[in-house]
Amino acid sequence: EAQVTQNPRYLITVTGKKLTVTCSQNMNHEYMSWYRQDPGLGLRQIYYSMNVEVTDKGDVPEGYKVSRKEKRNFPLILESPSPNQTSLYFCASSLSWQTTPYEQYFGPGTRLTVT
Amino acid sequence: EDKVVQSPLSLVVHEGDTVTLNCSYEVTNFRSLLWYKQEKKAPTFLFMLTSSGIEKKSGRLSSILDKKELFSILNITATQTGDSAVYLCAVEALANTGNQFYFGTGTSLTVIP
């Protein structure tokens, strides 16, 4: 089954404790992206990646890191989480960014709480 | 500043009604506009629009884009309770190093039996 998976689905952590949220897709998609969703603010793009070893900042990259060492994986790293990073996080992937635009497929989401 | 604005913020209708959801945008280097449906989980894709004036249809849902006036509408006819959800509009923009996506805050639709 074609899908985007994220782990963990729920996470409660404390301020300053480094964490990684994994994202994996099995559709051979080139484009991958991370979003956070907050009430009243909608979905905001954190980072995106056009292909392996190519990443760039979205609208709200502060406090986050990403890496793209393999095509299928795009982990989101919070080196020192703070309470304002409490949010619902979505990973998404798309077939290609270079030619015809394609829709993004979203993972199930990760609910992160930082206390 | 690139932005996407959706209206109304919320809508309550009765089954069988027809609704129109609006999405206006100000985005540099527009590439496409997308509509998603979100029901307390991940957004699911509805439509992608790239050309003005060409209606996309899927069952009772349809959407059209006006690139001159910078807006799109999503129509749902003969609404059903299963249409209750948040509908998200997103605009894809070409950036120097790839594509960025800008989302509106969504329209919350509630369909009453």
Image (tube, rainbow, N blue to C red):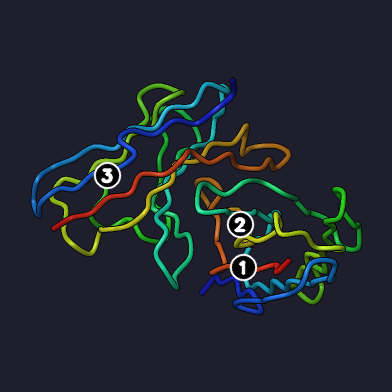
Q: Which residue is mark 3?
A: A65
Residue B8 image offset from top left, x and y in percent = 66, 79
A78, A90: nearer the viewer: A90
Is residue B21 shown left or right of residue A86?
A: right
**Tags 3 and 2 in contact by the CB under 8 Å rule?**
no
Q: What secondary structure is found at the residue carrying circle 3?
A: strand
Amino acid of disc 1: Val
- Picture coordinates of residue A34 (x, y %)? 42, 46
- Up the image or down, B78 lies above or below A90; here it is below
User: Which of the chains bears the disc numbered 3?
Assistant: A
Q: Residue at x 62, y 60 (%)?
A: B85
Residue denoted by label 1: B27
**Badge 3 amino acid:** Lys
Q: Are marks 1 and 2 in contact (CB under 8 Å)?
A: yes
Query: What numbered label is drawn on residue A5?
Result: none
Query: How many numbered marks have been drawn onto this rendered protein structure?
Result: 3
Q: Which residue is mark 2?
A: B93
Mark 2 falls on what kind of element?
A: strand
Residue A32, percent across and down?
49, 37
Q: CA distance from mark 3 to mark 2?
A: 22 Å
Q: Is residue B92 above or below residue B72?
A: above
Q: State left or right for residue A93 relative to residue A78.
A: right
- Quadrant where the C terminus of chain A sits is bottom left
Q: Quadrant of the N terminus of chain A?
A: top right
Task: Please state the chain letter of the residue tagged with numbered disc 1 in the rendered image.
Answer: B
Q: Amino acid at mark 2?
A: Ala
Label 1 – label 3 distance at C-alpha: 25 Å
Name the residue: 78% across, 54% down: B49
Q: Residue furthest front?
A: B113
